[in-house]
Image (cartoon, rainbow, N blue to C red):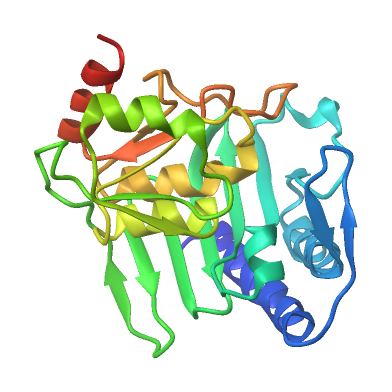
Amino acid sequence: MEPFLKTAIRAAKKAGDVIMPIYAREFSIEEKEDKSPVTEADIAADKVLHEVLKETKIAIRSEETEDDLSILENEYLWVVDPIDGTKDFIQKNGEFCVMIGLLRNKQPILGVIYGPALGYLYYAEKNKGAFVSLGDGTVHELSIGNQESLAEASLVVSRNHFGDIFTPYLEKTGITNMKHFGSNGLKLCKVAEGSFDMMFNPTPYLSEWDSAAAQIIIEEAGGIMSGVNGKPLNYAKENSKNPYGVLAANKQLVTQFLEKTHE
């Protein structure tokens, strides 16, 4: 295991250690400029991630820190979300996670996603496979599902951000087997481990920190991740948003999805 991965795992677990005591009690909630919620746990976790990751001397781009555009041309860049699924955290359904991605030349090369309430830690490094460490300490290699029929594919979608924008995609693909789940990162990990065949979110509100860590995990598990338009996701750009959302599945399902939705 490379030093950067060890540091990222330690950062994620330490963030979880400060998140869970707050999760267990009443906590303060504020509203950001974009109307999305932020809790004291988001801020506390962000502080911990900065404290640990700064040991690598690599700049950090975080959802909860003011953007410094001068770091975007760096060869290496951490892209983090202290709590992905803040609404799930507030609802206390356990389906939230810490997301830590490492970019090299604007491409994900390492990812750590930790669900402290569930006890699952997912991680991957480029060309080294993707894995999950379970709460009992066992480690399993991830492998994306081999479903080849789009109409029969199991789809995992957002619990809190599901709406009419999904309808045309569902109608065109014929997908009916659908389950709602929490944070974006954990949904993508569920696809990487083969629990679901596909995840897509066509909304234009997802940001780099919602996908960077998950993309390398999906790819190392044998899958493909892109926007719902089939174009690659771009990182370390001035506007952090992914304007065409996220699509993840095996190659066969992604190909069929794009054929059906772009007829």
Residue 131 or 231: which is nearer the viewer?
231
Q: Position of residue 195 (x, y in %)?
A: 26, 62
Q: Position of residue 237 (x, y in %)?
A: 68, 22
Residue drawn at 58 percent across, 52 percent down: 160
- Residue 106 drawn above or below residue 214: above
- Residue 190 drawn above or below residue 139: above
- Residue 124 seen: no
Q: Position of residue 134 (x, y in %)?
A: 39, 80
Name the image quarter holding residue 239: top right
Residue drawn at 27 percent across, 55 percent down: 196
Instruction: Please give left or right for residue 65 compared with residue 136 in the image.
Output: right
Residue drawn at 76 percent across, 86 percent down: 21
- Residue 153 drawn above or below residue 30: above
Instruction: Please give left or right for residue 100 compared with residue 131 in the image.
Output: right
- Residue 111 drawn above or below residue 120: above
Name the image quarter holding residue 209: top right
Q: Quadrant of the C terminus?
A: top left
- Residue 143 seen: yes
